[in-house]
Image (cartoon, coloured by chain):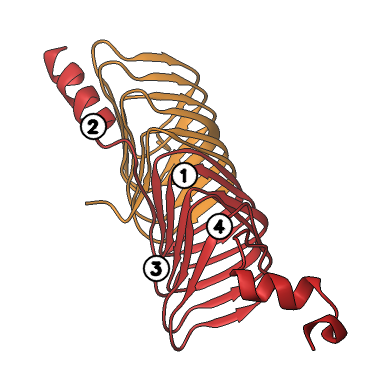
């Protein structure tokens, strides 16, 4: 009994350590708390309160992918609703719109196709030039 | 360290197939197929048919279990479903409801 309890504790301390291995394929929805690393294939939506990492060789094909942060070294397809940083590493392929107030970092050698909805304040001189007509500027 | 770990906070609704071993600490609903070992840890909830190599269960499984090797139901395990395997152990403290098919 004591053994069971101690292994239960080690299991819960491992919470947030989740991984879809290179030889694994998931077809369906993944949801939950904690960090997740995908080295295999995922076909389906992901809704994660935590950091999502798609390792080299890993692939996610989804309609929507929600996470607090996303690091891609593999292939990701789908709408990215990420509250934190989306980082596309060299050699990665990302296809999909980025929403949810995420900031995006594209490394040299990353492929990206999609729209980026980023909210930030434009510098004053850009605000003037875009707000005013070219005539007024002259 | 297992190749695939479904962490304690994670829920998967759907189908998981793996060429390597799988450890479940969280929740899996649907179907779980592995060519290697499957471990269902204490606190894990599996509502799925499970098939794989050596299967160690300390959590809860609702569904049929098929193993090419052996199935070990450890203390604290709760299994509702049929078990088909060449070797089966049911420890004292494991709960089990279903049929056993040892292919004799």
* Label 1–label 2 contact, CB within 8 A: no
- Of circles 3 and 4, the one toward us is 4
- Of circles 1 and 3, the one toward us is 3
- Of circles 2 and 4, the one toward us is 4
Pinpoint the chain carrying mark 1.
B
Q: Nearer the viewer, residue A30 or A97?
A: A97
Q: Residue at x 28, y 28 (%)?
A: A12
Pinpoint the chain carrying mark 4.
A
Q: Which residue is mark 4?
A: A102
Identify whether B57 is placed above or below A59.
above
* Label 1–label 3 contact, CB within 8 A: no
Q: Which residue is mark 1?
A: B51
Identify whether B9 is placed above or below B34.
above
Q: Nearer the viewer, residue A103 or B52?
A: A103
Q: Residues within 10 Å of mark 2 (few under 14, many from 20)?
A: few
Percent position of residue B94, x then y: 31, 15
- Which mark sits nearer the N-terminus, 2 or 3? 2
Q: Which mark is residue A13?
A: 2
Q: Residues within 10 Å of mark 3 (few under 14, many from 20)?
A: many
- Of circles 4 and 1, the one toward us is 4
Task: Specify the quadrant of the image occupied by residue A128.
Answer: bottom right
Element under label 3?
A: loop
Q: Which mark is residue A55?
A: 3
Horizontal relation, residue B81 to residue A131: left or right: left
- Which mark sits nearer the N-terminus, 3 or 4? 3
Q: Write down the colour of chain B.
A: orange
């Amino acid at each position: 009994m004591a053994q069971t309890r101690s292994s239960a504790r080690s299991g819960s301390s491992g919470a947030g350590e989740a991984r879809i291995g290179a030889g694994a394929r998931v077809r369906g929805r993944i949801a939950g708390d904690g960090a997740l690393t995908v080295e295999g294939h995922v076909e389906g939506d992901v809704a994660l309160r935590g950091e999502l990492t798609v390792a080299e060789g890993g692939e996610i094909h989804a309609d929507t992918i929600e996470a607090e942060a996303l690091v891609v070294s593999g292939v990701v397809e789908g709408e990215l609703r990420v509250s934190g940083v989306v980082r596309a590493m060299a050699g990665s392929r990302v296809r999909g719109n980025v929403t949810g107030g995420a900031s995006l970092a594209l490394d040299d050698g990353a492929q990206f196709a999609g729209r980026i909805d980023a909210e930030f304040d434009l510098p004053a001189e850009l605000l003037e030039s875009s707000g005013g007509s070219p005539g007024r500027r002259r | 360290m297992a190749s695939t770990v479904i962490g304690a906070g994670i829920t998967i609704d759907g189908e998981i197939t793996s060429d390597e071993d799988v450890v479940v600490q969280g929740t899996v609903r649907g179907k779980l197929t592995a060519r290697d070992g499957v471990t269902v840890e204490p606190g894990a909830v599996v509502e799925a048919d499970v098939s794989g190599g050596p299967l160690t269960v300390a959590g809860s499984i609702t569904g049929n279990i098929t193993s090419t090797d052996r199935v070990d139901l450890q203390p604290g395990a709760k299994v509702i479903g049929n078990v088909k395997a060449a070797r089966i152990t049911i420890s004292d403290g494991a709960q089990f409801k279903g049929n056993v098919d040892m292919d004799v």
